[in-house]
C-alpha cells in the first residue's frame, strides 16, 4: 500500500490534443513521457521522486495500452542499467530515482552507459533532494553529470517548462547519442499548474521489436579498444552535437536581454525564486516581466559559450545564481569569460552564500548587494544623503525603532527559551520497542557499537534512545560494522530495514558477513514493505500484488546465503520476547553471523488504512472496538522512566492531582493508537504498574450496554461507601 494513491489523478493522463491538463509536477512528467512515445520506464522510489513511482504504478493500465514496459527496480543501479536497452535499439527509455544518494548507487551503470553512448533517447529523471527539506547529505547531481558527460536539464519550475524538458531531453539524447539527466527539484515535483496537452503516442520502436530483431555494435561496448575512443567521441562528436541542438532549439531562454548593462545568469530551477526577489525590489512583476536582463539556463550542463558571449555583450557585470558547493557553473563561466576575452565583472559566491538552498530571502540579500553596487537601486541610506542614480528604484523603507529601543532588554535567543525537539518515531511505531529492548539489554550487558541504516530506524540515534554510531548508506548497515569483527567480549550490532535489505543489504551485509565469518548481530526491521519511502511493495511484502511477485520471506533468503542463527519475532510490541532474543543473540556461543528479523507493520500506514474503515463502519452504525491506554495518576510515581524508555509522542506529563505531591505525573494523550508499548515498558523496566488499557466501543451491543450499566452502578456504590467511611474517619 503506497503512501499516496493517484488512482483518480492518473485519469488525466488520457487527455488528448488541445485539452487543458491541471495537476502536479510529477503527473505532468508522466503525461510528458506518454506524449514522447517512451518504450520503457523503470525506477526506485526516494524523496522527492517517490510519488512519481506511485503515479507510474497506478497508471500501469494506461502504460500497457501503449505497450510501455514499467518496472519497480530493485535499486537505483538496476534502474540505471535498464537504460542499456537504448544502447543498440532506437528505444526511448526513462528511469527515475533520488539524487544524490540514488545517483551514487547508480554511478557505475551511468558511467558505462555514458561511455558507450545510446542510440535511442535515454532520460534519467533525478529527484534533486537538496536544501532545507532534504534528509540526506548535502550534495548535488551536477558533479555526476560533469564526471560522465551526461547532459543536465534544470527546467523552470512550471508545468509547461517541465513537460517541454521531458520531450527535449529525449530529442537531445538522440541528437547527441548521450543520456540526458532531468533534474526535478522538490518544488518542481510538487508544483501545481496547467499546460495544453498533446496526444499520447505509442513508441515508434517497441521492446518486442528489439527482442525479435537483436542487433549489436562493438563500438558501443565498454571494452578495449572501443573504450579508448569513447572519451574522444564525447568531446569531438557528442558535445558539439548537443551544443548545436541546444542553440537551434532555444532550450535556454533570454529575458529582457537589452534592458540594462548588468544581468543575471541562473539555472532554470532558481527562476521562480529570483522573480519573487526581483518583484520585492520592484524590478519584476508577478508575471515574470523583468527590468533586469536574465539568462535562464534550462540546460545546466553543458554551458553554451556563444550564448554567454551574446548575453554578456555591452554589460559591465553579471550575477550568477548557483546553489551549493563546489561552484561548478561559476568556475565554468569564469573560464568562458577569460577565453572569450570578455571584459566584465562576474559575481556569484562573493555576494551569495557559499552553500545552502537559495530561498527568496537569501537571493534577495545577494541581489540587493549586486544592484546597489552598480547603481540599479538606491538604498534608504544613500537616498537620505541625496545620492541619485539612474535608473533608480527606491527600496521599501521600514519604520524607525523607538528612542528607547537601544536600551531595551534584548530578547533571549530562541535556543535558550525553546527546548529542541529532535525528530522521532511516529505514535505506535513498531520500531520503538526494538530500541527500547536494546536500551534494556544495554543496562545488563553494557553499551554496544551499533551501525544503523537509512530509514526510520535512524531516529534511534537521537533522544530518548541515543543508540547508533554510524550510518553509511541504504542497505549498508551490516557493511558499516564489517571492520568490527574480532574476538572480544562484545559484538557489534547492525540495523537495516527490509527495503534496505532487498536493495543492497542481502549481498553487501548478510552475504559478506557469512563469507568473512562475522560473529556480529544484524537486526532486520521487517514492515513487509518499504515504509520509509511510502509503503511500496517489495519481495517480502505480504500483500497480493497482481503485477509483482511477493511473499518471499527474508528468513529464507538469509538462510539461503548461509546464516544458521536466525530468529524471527512476528510481534515487536512483545517487549519481553524482544529483550530475551536480543540477549541471546549477544551472548550465544554459536559461531557465525546472527540475524534477528523483527516484524510489525508501519503504524502510520496501518492507521491510514484502518481509520478509513473505522469511519465507514461508524457511519454505517456497526460496532467498532478501539483500544487506548491511560495512566492512573494516583499510582504514577512521577519517575517518567516510561517516557525515557519509549519517547512516544502520545506520552506526556500532567499536573499531579495529589496536593501533597508536586512532581507531574505521566499521561496518555488522545493520539494514542493502543500499541501497548508504554504498559510493556512500565513492567519490563520494573516501574510502577500505573498503566491501564481501556476499550472504547462505538455502537455497543445490548449485552455491552447492560454490562456497562451494572459496572457503573456497582462502582458508584463502592465509591459512595468509601466516601462515607472517609467522612466518618475525618471527625
Image (cartoon, rainbow, N blue to C red):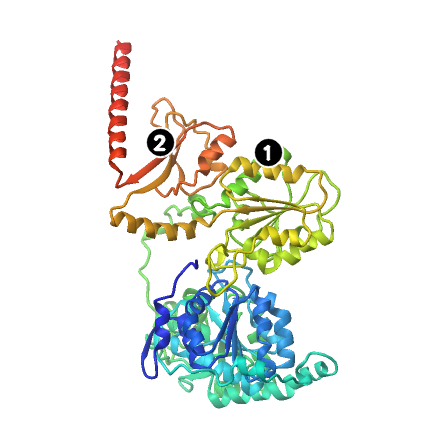
Pick the quarter of the image with the N terminus.
bottom left
Q: Position of residue 296 (x, y in %)?
A: 46, 79
Instruction: Pick out the residue farthest to the top.
Output: 731
Residue beneath label 2, please?
655
Q: How many marks?
A: 2
Kind of element beneath mark 1: helix
**Residue 160, placed above or below residue 694:** below
Expressed as whole percent of the image width and height from the top left, the position of residue 566 reads 63, 45
The front one of 663 and 691 is 691
Mark nearer the viewer, 1 or 2: 1
**Quadrant of the rendered image containing residue 672:** top left
Q: Which residue is painted at 58% across and 53% down in the image?
A: 554
Picture disc at residue 443: 1
Q: Observer-nearest residue: 242 or 559?
A: 559
The foreground one among 598 and 337 is 598
* Image position of 210 with respect to 472: above or below: below
The quarter of the picture where the C terminus appears is top left
In the rendered image, residue 293, in percent from the top left (x then y), is placed at: 42, 82
Whole-percent x, y for residue 309 in the image:
52, 87
Residue 550 showing in the rendered view: yes
Label 2: element kind: loop
Mark with earlier residue (1, 2):
1
- Left or right placement of residue 18 versus residue 108 in this view: left
Indicate the quadrant where residue 225 lies: bottom right
Amino acid at each position: 500500500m503506497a503512501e499516496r494513491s493517484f488512482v483518480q489523478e492518473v485519469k488525466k493522463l488520457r487527455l488528448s490534443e488541445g485539452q487543458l491538463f491541471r495537476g502536479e509536477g510529477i503527473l505532468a512528467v508522466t503525461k510528458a513521457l506518454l506524449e514522447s512515445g517512451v518504450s520503457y520506464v523503470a525506477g526506485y522510489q526516494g524523496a522527492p521522486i517517490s510519488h512519481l513511482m506511485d503515479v507510474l504504478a497506478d497508471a500501469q493500465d494506461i502504460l500497457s495500452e501503449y505497450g510501455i514496459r514499467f518496472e519497480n527496480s530493485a535499486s537505483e543501479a538496476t534502474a540505471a542499467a535498464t537504460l542499456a536497452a537504448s544502447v543498440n535499439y532506437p528505444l526511448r527509455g526513462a528511469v527515475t530515482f533520488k539524487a544524490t544518494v540514488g545517483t551514487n548507487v547508480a554511478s557505475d551503470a551511468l558511467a558505462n552507459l555514458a561511455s558507450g553512448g545510446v542510440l535511442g533517447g535515454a532520460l534519467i529523471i533525478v529527484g534533486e533532494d537538496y536544501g532545507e527539506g532534504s534528509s540526506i547529505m548535502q550534495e548535488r547531481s551536477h558533479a555526476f553529470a560533469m564526471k560522465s558527460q551526461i547532459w543536465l536539464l534544470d527546467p523552470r519550475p512550471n508545468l509547461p517548462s517541465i513537460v517541454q524538458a521531458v520531450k527535449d531531453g529525449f530529442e537531445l539524447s538522440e541528437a547527441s547519442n548521450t543520456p540526458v539527466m532531468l533534474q526535478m527539484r522538490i518544488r518542481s515535483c510538487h508544483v501545481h499548474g496547467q499546460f495544453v496537452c498533446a496526444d499520447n503516442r505509442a513508441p515508434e520502436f517497441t521492446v518486442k521489436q528489439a527482442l525479435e530483431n537483436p542487433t549489436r555494435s562493438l563500438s558501443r561496448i565498454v571494452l578495449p579498444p572501443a573504450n579508448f575512443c569513447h572519451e574522444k567521441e564525447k568531446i569531438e562528436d557528442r558535445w558539439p552535437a548537443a551544443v548545436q541542438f541546444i542553440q537551434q532549439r532555444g532550450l535556454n531562454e533570454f529575458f529582457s536581454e537589452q534592458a540594462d548593462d548588468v544581468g543575471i545568469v541562473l539555472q532554470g530551477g532558481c527562476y521562480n525564486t529570483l522573480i519573487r526577489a526581483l518583484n520585492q525590489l520592484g524590478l519584476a512583476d508577478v508575471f515574470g516581466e523583468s527590468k533586469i536582463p536574465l539568462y535562464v539556463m534550462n540546460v545546466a550542463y553543458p554551458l553554451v559559450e556563444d550564448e554567454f558571449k551574446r548575453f554578456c555583450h555591452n554589460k559591465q557585470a553579471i550575477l550568477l545564481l548557483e546553489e551549493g558547493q563546489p561552484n561548478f557553473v561559476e568556475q565554468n563561466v569564469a573560464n568562458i569569460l577569460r577565453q572569450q576575452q570578455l571584459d566584465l565583472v562576474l559575481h556569484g559566491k562573493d555576494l551569495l552564500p557559499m552553500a545552502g538552498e537559495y530561498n527568496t530571502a537569501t537571493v534577495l540579500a545577494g541581489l540587493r548587494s549586486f544592484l546597489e553596487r552598480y547603481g540599479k537601486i538606491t538604498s534608504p541610506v544613500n537616498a537620505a544623503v541625496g545620492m541619485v542614480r539612474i535608473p533608480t528604484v527606491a527600496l521599501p523603507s521600514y519604520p524607525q525603532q523607538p528612542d528607547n529601543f537601544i536600551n531595551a532588554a534584548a530578547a533571549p535567543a530562541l535556543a535558550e527559551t525553546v527546548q529542541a525537539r529532535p525528530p522521532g518515531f511516529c505514535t505506535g511505531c513498531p520500531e520503538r520497542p526494538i530500541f527500547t529492548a536494546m536500551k534494556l539489554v544495554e543496562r545488563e550487558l553494557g553499551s554496544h557499537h551499533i551501525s544503523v541504516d537509512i530509514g526510520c530506524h535512524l531516529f534511534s540515534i537521537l533522544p530518548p534512545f541515543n543508540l547508533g554510531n554510524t550510518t553509511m548508506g541504504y542497505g549498508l548497515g551490516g557493511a558499516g560494522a564489517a571492520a568490527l569483527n574480532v574476538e572480544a567480549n562484545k559484538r557489534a550490532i547492525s540495523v537495516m530495514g527490509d527495503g534496505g535489505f532487498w536493495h543492497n543489504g542481502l549481498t553487501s551485509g548478510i552475504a559478506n558477513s557469512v563469507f568473512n565469518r562475522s560473529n556480529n548481530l544484524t537486526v532486520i526491521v521487517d514492515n513487509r514493505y518499504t515504509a520509509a519511502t511510502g509503503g511500496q511493495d517489495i519481495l517480502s511484502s505480504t500483500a497480493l500484488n497482481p503485477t509483482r511477485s511477493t511473499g518471499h520471506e527474508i528468513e529464507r533468503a538469509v538462510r539461503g546465503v548461509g546464516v544458521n542463527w536466525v530468529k524471527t519475532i512476528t510481534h515487536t510490541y512483545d517487549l519481553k520476547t524482544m529483550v530475551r532474543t536480543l540477549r541471546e543473540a549477544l551472548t550465544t556461543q554459536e559461531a557465525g553471523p546472527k540475524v534477528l528479523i523483527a516484524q510489525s507493520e508501519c503504524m502510520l500506514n496501518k492507521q491510514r488504512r484502518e481509520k478509513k474503515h473505522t469511519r465507514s463502519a461508524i457511519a454505517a452504525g456497526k460496532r467498532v472496538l478501539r483500544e487506548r491506554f491511560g495512566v492512573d495518576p494516583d499510582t504514577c510515581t512521577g519517575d517518567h522512566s516510561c517516557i525515557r524508555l519509549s519517547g512516544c509522542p502520545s506520552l506526556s506529563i500532567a499536573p499531579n492531582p495529589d496536593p501533597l505531591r508536586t512532581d507531574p505525573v505521566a499521561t496518555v494523550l488522545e493520539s494514542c493508537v493502543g500499541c501497548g508499548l508504554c504498559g510493556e515498558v512500565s513492567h519490563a523496566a520494573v516501574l510502577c504498574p500505573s498503566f491501564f488499557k481501556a476499550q472504547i466501543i462505538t455502537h455497543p451491543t445490548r449485552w455491552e450496554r447492560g454490562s456497562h450499566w451494572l459496572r457503573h452502578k456497582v462502582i458508584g456504590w463502592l465509591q459512595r461507601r468509601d466516601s462515607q467511611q472517609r467522612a466518618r474517619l475525618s471527625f
